[in-house]
Amino acid sequence: MQAGEASLARRLPVAMAEPRAREVLALLHRRGRLTRAEIARLTGQSQAAVSLLVRTLIEAGLVQESLAAPRGLGRPAHHLGIAPGAWSVLSFEVVAGLLRLAVVAGDGSVLNATEQPLPTGTLGLHALIQRMLRMAAEADRGSAGPLLAASVSVSGVVHRGVVVLSAGLGLRQAPVAEPLSEELGVPVWLVNDMDARALAEHRYGVGRGVDHLVLVAVEPSGIGAGIVQQGRPFAGARGSAGELGHVTVERHGLACPCGKRGCLEVYGSENAIVSRSAHLLRLQRRRRPFVESPTEGFHYVRRQVEELWALAAADAGIRRIFEDAMDYLGTAVANLVTLFDPELVIVAGHLMKLLGPWGMTLLTQRVREGAFDPGAEHRKIVEAALGEDSGMRGAAYLAVDRMLAGD
Ligand SMILES: [Zn+2]
């Protein structure tokens, strides 16, 4: 820790403990780029009180001011925002086969991100925590502000710092937040990876200013949805809301690794596309374009699907498998739209990016056909704007948001 950083680290808790200062920080963190007048209006504090408070926060290095070009004829506006060096969050992402870590700055930008492969299924909680701590110790924090919190975006059901269930990670009732928090010396927040991505799009991406949205993603690790309602993640009573991969799409369908039958996961996922294609090619006594791997790692499934999609251009049978996956996915997303009435549906993940406009057109068509949708003309279905670090950015955002809210 550098000298300037040390004094900032002392001032940060003081600002966080003062309710009016915290309210302003929370607002700027949630909305970004506000003028003093807007802060006064939104907090109900007087302009004079806000000016005084803002000056203290700027002097403490927590808030920074920028001059924006005027809209129309007026004077240029002084916009306020959280300073990048105000604080930092160590934000992990744990999905089947992959562990990522980003150092997220006060303004939500990523300063540095690293990743390493994760053995699937067999790692265990203790080994996972050790790997995360090692990664945190090696992280290049560069110009990052003092460490405020850590966050973990997890592919699985999470509730109050515990991974309730993650089939891909082989974890059940695993208390991840507590040991991490003890070792890192800061609060640790766990969030489902899809909720984290939905939050990131809501704050920094294509969903900026939209308070009701859903994000749907098809990744090599599975299918999921993140739901943002009134600007907050909707996780349900025990954290399992939005497990879109496990909605039933065939009443007496194929067995799913989760123990149920007929889940979307076994019809519309990348793994489903790979296994159905392998079956088809076997029936036709044709050589598969790939060798099957015993580990089925994240990058491996990804490559298999890419090879199959290249094959689909000249192979109607393989293309039909991709179409079927879009049919099932579209039906499930239509039901999600009917249940939650989002303003925006954000489509993310490896598969949809691979399928490009072909996939988006098909999916949009299925959603429009399948949803009970009196407000359809107002609803947009769009591609995600953020990249692979969106889960880590969303998780860091949630951690800071909750801390500033005093949770
Ligand atoms: Zn299932």
Image (spheres, rainbow, N blue to C red):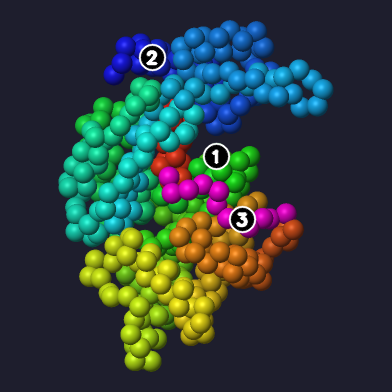
Spot occupied by residue 205 in the image (x, y as percentages of width and height): 56, 43
- Where is mark 3, residue-wise? 382
Can residue 196 be seen?
A: no
**Which amino acid, mark 3?**
Val
- Where is mark 2, residue-wise? 8
Q: Earlier in the sequence, mark 3 or mark 2?
A: 2
Q: Earlier in the sequence, mark 3 or mark 1?
A: 1
* Residue 64, disc: none
At numbered mark 1, what does the secondary structure look like: helix, strand or loop?
A: helix
User: Which residue is painted at 47% across and 34% down in the image?
Assistant: 109
Residue contact at pointers 1 and 2, CB within 8 angstroms: no
Magenta range is 378-389
At numbered mark 2, what does the secondary structure look like: helix, strand or loop?
A: helix
Gap in angstroms between the C-alphas marked 3 and 2: 41 Å
Residue contact at pointers 3 and 1, CB within 8 angstroms: no
Label 1: how many Cα within 10 Å (few below 14, some 14–19, many 20+): many
